[in-house]
Amino acid sequence: MLNAFVNDAYLTFLLGNEKFAVHVNNVQEVVELNEITKVPNTPDYMLGIINLRGRVLPLLDTRLKLGLPAAQRTSKNRILILEITDGDEKMMQVGAIVDVAREVVEINVQQIQKTADMDNYKHSTPVTGIVNNQGDITMIIDINKVFISTDISGMADIIRG
């Protein structure tokens, strides 16, 4: 019964009309969209690199990475500076563009419905849980599954020179 009172903090954001959440422990900060430097021969979801106060970070399009259609950039777009863990347990920072960064919310672990237990689906989907707050659906995602470090290791090598 101890879990009944456990709350975790999540940052919510929008991609189109869909609401997602990532655990705040993975979010370093939220910044406005600034100048993007294109890097040749990278996948579509890798938009390039950004300079964040002297640090060069890979910038990824969260929509494309999740298989959603691309969208026009607006003044509401934000970059989530995320910390992901690679296979060797090394931390790496990336920028991820979202349509709208919303708010930090406390979610009781009892409210989180686990994703469907289907053979390959459960292992491949980045959605680890769903919260249904009176019809307001929020999908909780594991950023380490969304931004797989092998996908961005090539860009990291370019950044390091």
Image (cartoon, rainbow, N blue to C red):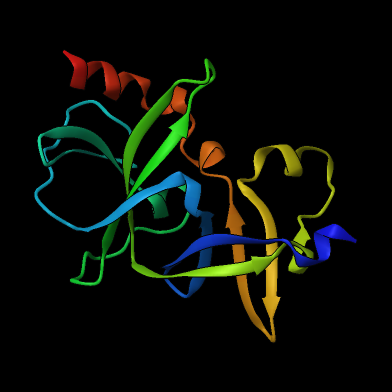
Q: Position of residue 46 (x, y in %)?
A: 30, 38
Q: Position of residue 98 (x, y in %)?
A: 35, 60
Q: Which of the 4 quarters of the picture holds residue 134?
A: bottom right
Quarter that holds the N terminus: bottom right
Give the side of residue 62 with respect to residue 131, left or right. Answer: left
Image point (70%, 76%), residue name: 132
Q: Which of the 4 quarters of the picture holds residue 32?
A: bottom left
Quarter that holds the C terminus: top left
Q: Is residue 17 above or below residue 140?
A: below
Taking depth in this image into account, of 146 and 2 the one nearest to the observer is 2
The residue most toward the right is: 1
Q: Is residue 44 visible?
A: no
Image point (10%, 35%), residue name: 54
Image point (81%, 59%), residue name: 3
Give the side of residue 132 with respect to residue 10, left or right. Answer: right
Image point (45%, 22%), residue name: 150
Q: Position of residue 112 (x, y in %)?
A: 73, 63
Taking depth in this image into account, of 157 and 109 the one nearest to the observer is 109
Give the side of residue 121 with respect to residue 4, left or right. Answer: left
Q: Is residue 58 visible?
A: yes
